[in-house]
Image (spheres, rainbow, N blue to C red):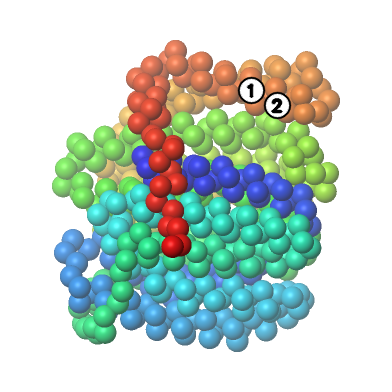
């Protein structure tokens, strides 16, 4: 619960700052940053070799393995930064964007920082002690987002995104080490982590393929349609995947170690899996359908008229975003069962079919790329869902039954918002704010009447939070 509260509080604050930054910066700035981040994060997957997943999944972990893993990660990260530094020149030449060279080189410094972050985070995750991680992420997110806003207002352009991201990563590592001090000792026993590397590389292969698939659209749009089109598309994609990306990382950190512990307790595994999917639906269905319905007002009024071309692709991507959100419970289940190859097959399908569809659809601009997502992704999702349910020996009807109440409440939300918009047809703040209020009221009221048990659970969770204790853990210099 503490982890969820910190995550949501940090995300809410950074969201407000993100909207301010989007109004200041141009689509080209977001396009350049998107290209650099795709390139950097790809090497980040390679540098880790899946060791973080192996450290969490391993049943008995000793100091020989943790300290050896640190030095191995440190060596990998150093090599990756050198490689990224050199490759930044041909990459910027390929995209005909000279600025990209220095952007990649500066962002690559994150490799040198992350070596000190991975081990303590994995040790906390193994113990299901998520609050220190959430505190570190919360404080660093506020600091990084605020710095981006200030730098953007001062006219730094794309460099406000670059420097703010670097500062956030550095602050996150520093806060994490403050809350959970861990320092490496010179212990090297590589034979002790061979099995961990084998498992980790299988997990990482599927993660890397998934990442490449998720970002192949950015790479193709950047090359074929240019930086401005990429900036527009990237913002639409970010908006449609914020619930999946932010809450998905929260859920993965909770569910992977939890499912790993429950491997031999099938009734408990069923219970937690179904409940996790229900809570995912409670957030994903109303947030993404709501965004789809108000996007025509939200984009010009909140982001500004320069972002109007993202309205239609955003609506399409919101529908895909629901399936992406539902996917976040499936991968940790299969990883915890020691079956990363099933996730790898899902990633291979998407990695082969989606980029081909993206390239062909660029003839129709960013709307065509969004439509390619909507046409292909559901096929892979259904495969992964079927294999997960087979692993659990659960019928599809049981899975669907746990999504019924959120789906019904969201349907009422959609009807209420559509009806309200019929009476206020112009794009105004009155229509936008009114639609949000009407939709939230309709969803909450419907859920209250059809699923009182879930409402009581959520109310209990909210009452148990002590928000005024939020900042007690912020370190203060003496």
Is residue 440 something that shows in the picture?
Answer: yes
In the picture, which quadrant includes the N terminus? Answer: top left
Q: Could you give the CA–CA distance between mark 2 and mark 1, rounded to whole angstroms?
A: 6 Å
Q: Position of residue 450 (x, y in %)?
A: 43, 15
Q: Position of residue 278 (x, y in %)?
A: 39, 32
Q: Position of residue 367 (x, y in %)?
A: 73, 48
In the picture, which quadrant includes the C terminus? Answer: bottom left
Instruction: Write the residue at 56% across / 81% down.
Output: 84
Q: Which residue is mark 1?
A: 437
10 Å crowding of disc 1: few (<14), some (14-19), many (20+): few
Viewer-proximal residue, 7 or 289? 7
Q: Are marks 2 and 1 in contact (CB under 8 Å)?
A: yes
Instruction: Write the residue at 31% across / 56% down.
Output: 125
Q: Position of residue 153 (x, y in %)?
A: 76, 57
Instruction: Write the residue at 45% across / 79% down.
Output: 77
279 on left or right of 199: right
Residue 433 disc label: 2
455 on left or right of 273: right
Residue 193 disc label: none
- Helix, strand, or loop for circle 1? helix
10 Å crowding of disc 2: few (<14), some (14-19), many (20+): some
């Amino acid at each position: 619960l503490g982890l969820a509260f910190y995550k949501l509080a940090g995300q809410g604050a950074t969201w407000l700052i993100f909207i301010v930054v989007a109004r200041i910066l141009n689509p080209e700035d977001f396009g350049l940053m998107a290209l650099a981040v795709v390139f950097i994060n790809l090497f980040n997957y390679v540098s880790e070799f899946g060791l973080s997943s192996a450290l969490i999944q391993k049943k008995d972990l000793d100091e020989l393995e943790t300290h050896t893993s640190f030095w191995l990660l440190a060596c990998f990260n150093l090599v990756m930064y050198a490689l990224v530094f050199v490759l930044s020149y041909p990459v910027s030449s390929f995209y005909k964007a000279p600025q990209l060279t220095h952007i990649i080189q500066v962002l690559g410094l994150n490799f040198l920082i992350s070596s000190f972050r991975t081990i303590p985070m994995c040790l906390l995750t193994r113990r299901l002690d998520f609050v220190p991680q959430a505190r570190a992420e919360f404080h660093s997110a506020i600091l990084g987002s605020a710095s981006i806003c200030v730098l953007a207002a001062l006219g730094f352009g794309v460099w406000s995104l670059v420097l703010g991201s670097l500062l956030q990563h550095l602050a996150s590592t520093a806060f994490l080490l403050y809350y959970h001090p861990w320092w490496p000792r010179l212990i090297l026993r590589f034979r002790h982590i061979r099995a961990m590397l084998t498992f980790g590389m299988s997990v990482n292969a599927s993660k890397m393929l998934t990442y490449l698939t998720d970002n192949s659209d950015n790479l193709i749009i950047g090359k074929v349609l240019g930086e401005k089109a990429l900036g527009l598309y990237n913002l639409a994609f970010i908006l449609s995947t914020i619930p999946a990306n932010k809450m998905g990382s929260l859920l993965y950190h909770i569910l992977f170690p939890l499912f790993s512990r429950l491997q031999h307790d099938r009734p408990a595994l069923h219970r937690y899996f179904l409940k996790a999917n229900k809570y995912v639906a409670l957030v994903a269905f109303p947030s993404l359908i709501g965004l789809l319905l108000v996007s025509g007002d939200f984009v010009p009024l909140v982001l500004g008229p320069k972002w109007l071309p993202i309205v239609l692709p955003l609506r399409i991507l919101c529908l895909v975003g629901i399936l992406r959100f539902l996917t976040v419970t499936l991968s940790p289940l299969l990883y915890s069962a020691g079956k990363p190859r099933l996730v790898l097959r899902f990633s291979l399908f998407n990695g082969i079919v989606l980029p081909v569809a993206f390239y062909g659809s660029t003839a129709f601009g960013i709307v065509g790329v969004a439509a390619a997502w909507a046409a292909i992704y559901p096929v892979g999702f259904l495969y992964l869902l079927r294999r997960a349910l087979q692993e659990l020996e659960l019928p599809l009807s049981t899975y669907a039954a746990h999504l019924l109440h959120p789906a019904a409440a969201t349907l009422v939300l959609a009807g209420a918002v559509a009806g309200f918009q019929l009476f206020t047809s112009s794009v105004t703040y009155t229509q936008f704010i009114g639609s949000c209020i009407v939709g939230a009221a309709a969803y909450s009221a419907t859920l209250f009447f059809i699923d009182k048990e879930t409402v009581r659970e959520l109310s209990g969770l909210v009452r148990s939070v002590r928000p005024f204790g939020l900042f007690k853990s912020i370190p203060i210099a003496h």
